[in-house]
Amino acid sequence: MAMAAALAPVLAGSLPAHGTAGAPLAAPAIEAPKDAGDPLVIDDITPESVDSKSTVRVTGRITNTTDKAVKDITVRMRYSAAPLAGRAQVRAHAAGDRNTPPATGPDTTVAGPIEPGESAEYELKADAKDLGFDTYGVYPMTIEADRPSGKALGSQDSFLPYKGGGKADPVKVSWVWPLMDQPQRADDDTFLGNELDEEVGPEGRLGRLLSIGGQTGHLSLQTPEPSPPDETPASPASPSPSESPQKSADASDDDGDPTAKSSVEPPEEDRVPVTWAVDPALLEDIERISDSGYRAVADSGAESTAPATKKYAASSNARMWLRQAKGIIGDEPLIATPYADPDLAALLREGLEDDAEASIELGRQAVEETLGRTADPTVAWPSGGVMNDATHEFLHDNGAERYLLSDAAMPPERWLGHTPTAQAPIPESDESAASSAVVADSGLTSILGQSSWGPGEAALAKQRFAAETMMITAERPGEERTIVLAPPRDWDPSPELADELLKATESLPWIEPVALDDIKGAGKGGDQRRSLTYPEKTARSELGGGYLDQVKDVRGDIRLFNSVLTDHSDPFRRSVLRMESAAWRGDTPKAEQVRTIVADAVSGAKGKVRIMPGEPYQLLGESGKLPIVVANDLTEHPVRVRLSIRSENAARLEVGDLGTAEMDIAPTRKTTVYVPIESHVNGRTVLHAQVQNQEGEPLNVHEVTTPVTTSGTGTTALYITYAAAGVLLIALLPRVLRKWRRLRFKGGPRASVVPPGTPPTGSLDDDAADSGHGDAAAAAPAAEPGSAHGTADGPDPAGNGSASPADPPPAAPDDTAVQQNGSGSAEAADESDGDGEGPEPTARG
């Protein structure tokens, strides 16, 4: 067979025009990619659809993966002149499970030498008419590389779809384009890692999917760099005279709103229609990191249930992504999962219908708040594309009419020899509840989900996609059918593959793109598919009962916390749904980490409504009031609580009745409760206090203790004291009376204490007079030397003498009380006598 083959290695970007078949050409080495694993790589196959006038061109490279230099490597195309008979043969050839095609095509020799770790490029060309293709279909092709000894260096299997020799009506193809991921947070304030900031960036997975799915071509998620200070920006920084200040302010506000409509509008030309699919929880996660700083687990790969966290600044990537998403998605078809894509089958199995209902309500709310529009509530995409009867009934009750399913949920009939159309009815016993399914092709989903980041992987995936879709068309050339392309929820295609697949959907002549909304009716799918099936493998992978029992425990603590909130909020509702996500199927360590973080957050929130520890209390007396301070450290929620307090020993220290009085405490405020207590016996007693909700349930397990020491007299002790005092009084009374009588009737004279400044009267002390003992002369001041008349300074005894005007004034009396003795001298009086009856004068002479 004559073939035109240009067999020239393309080295370092230089491609000779032609070469002679089999002629060795020198191959300057180029550095191999770091991730080059296969020694032979196919980089491109053109055209994507071959006809009789086409020239097939295959390019790629050879990498020396040995530890020695290699040379004279022969690269050859092998193919079959007979098309493959069905999709099973396509899968087998792609997996390398078929014999090497028998026909030999063009070849080339890479002379080398190629040093270890280096690569050399190759190119093979052949005219389609020389390959002998004459029938519409998919032809297998293998590119192989051999050493001079004939030992194989490597090979790659691919396909050549040939559209000549016949014509088939195109199969309709509908794209579902997912912007989804597993939950990024545990509780509202703790992210499981900081990957989301990178994911929504220009080169991140979600950033690429948004821009490629939007098919805008010119879209960039890169935040514009600010102009240098000495340069004038292209757009004025301040409003022009014709622009009102209010308009400028509004523009600034739009920049600050992550949900503001993007200024990037989709192009006017027709695009491949896609139906966007989102997880509302992911949209809220992106919005959260765009608003303000946040905390994330420092090591997202760690399996610790109590990992360390790190603080991050608000994400400008997230802010830009949300703006662009709102503009790109616009009014395009949009479907959404319930919030956090929960494991509905497991929730309904374990009696958690309330959580399932909340996931529907919160999901719809989140989409509207972040994108400014609603998703189609009539289309449901259950986790994994499968659902059991309970899930089907639940989704139907919440508005679903059509279900996006995998063909594992509604497999083709065993006798069917071709791919059935995507539309299929779901029989119902009640005709009013009848619904339908659009079934995604699992084979194509697998192709879309295969790795496309390694050398040559994108080219092989694109060619496999073309081969599979052509084979579906060739199965029933004249029958109208539809296939649905639903990539995995966490789809991560290379930009090259994602972009090429969308273009191929438009350019391949055997498929025709349509919107999911345009797929109407059931066609013949109802006769060709089995009824709704729930795979046993999926049932085994559901979240287990043991794990959900632990989730129920956390829910119980959340219910208790919510019971004291007076604003009727439920701040941990979303956290519960994240714990119940189907993303944790088969990922027990991550599920446990999320549950533990949420449980700790709930415990911490409950602990913020607390009794403040006080100092040990000293009760001086029989009763008193103990101050207890109750604090609400929550920053956003007011609470209503009751105080419960008990004595460790009620016989010693009794707590008064607090009744059922409730306290309303505003956020970040405190209140003091005065608890009546009564002591019966002195000593130390511990009081235990708790905060309770209105039903008397304790908010926290641990009690706050306050030691109370009673040092006053209790009732019993008072009775004993009074009795002892009475006995003592009776015993001492006769002695006291005897002493009093002795002092009064038999005792000596008692001198009076003379108050300071009192003039002498010459009279006796009352006691002395009464007792008739001795005379005491009135004290008189001594005469001053040099007195004119030699008389005393005091009054004249006869009553007719007076001090001379020339005499000095009498001396001032001393402040100290004194008493007189017989010789006329004075001494200080004692402050008290031995009996405690006051000062006792002393008599002398």
Image (cartoon, rainbow, N blue to C red):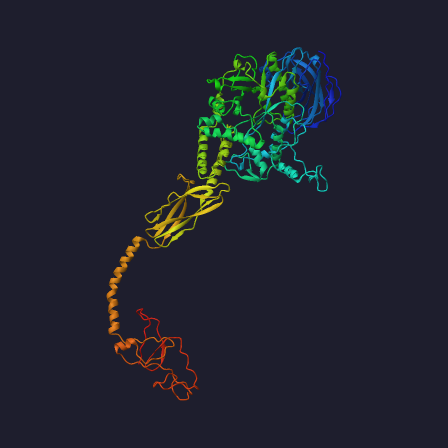
In this rendering, the answer to whether 750 lies above or below 646 is below
Residue 776 in picture, x, y percent from top left: 31, 80
Instruction: Report the quarter where the N terminus lies.
Output: top right
Q: Is residue 645 above or below residue 346?
A: below
Q: How many numbered markers are drawn?
A: 0
Position of 523 with respect to 675 (left or right) is right
Q: Nearer the viewer, residue 264 or 125?
A: 264
Instruction: Indicate whether 469 appears above or below 623.
Output: above
Q: Residue at x 74, y 21 (%)?
A: 25
Position of 376 with respect to 5 (left or right) is left
Please tell me which residue lies in front, 400 or 168. Answer: 400
**Residue 407 in view, yes or no:** no
Q: Quarter holding the C terminus?
A: bottom left
Question: Residue 56 at x, y = what percent?
Answer: 69, 17
Residue 20 in the image: state x and y as whole percent. Answer: 75, 17
Quarter of the image for residue 157 reads top right
Question: Taking the image as drawn, is residue 832 in sight?
Answer: yes
Residue 534 percent location from the top left of the image: 49, 21
Q: Is residue 150 left or right of residue 647?
A: right
Instruction: Name the residue furthest right.
Output: 17
Quadrant in which residue 469 is drawn: top right
In the image: residue 434, left or right of residue 773: right
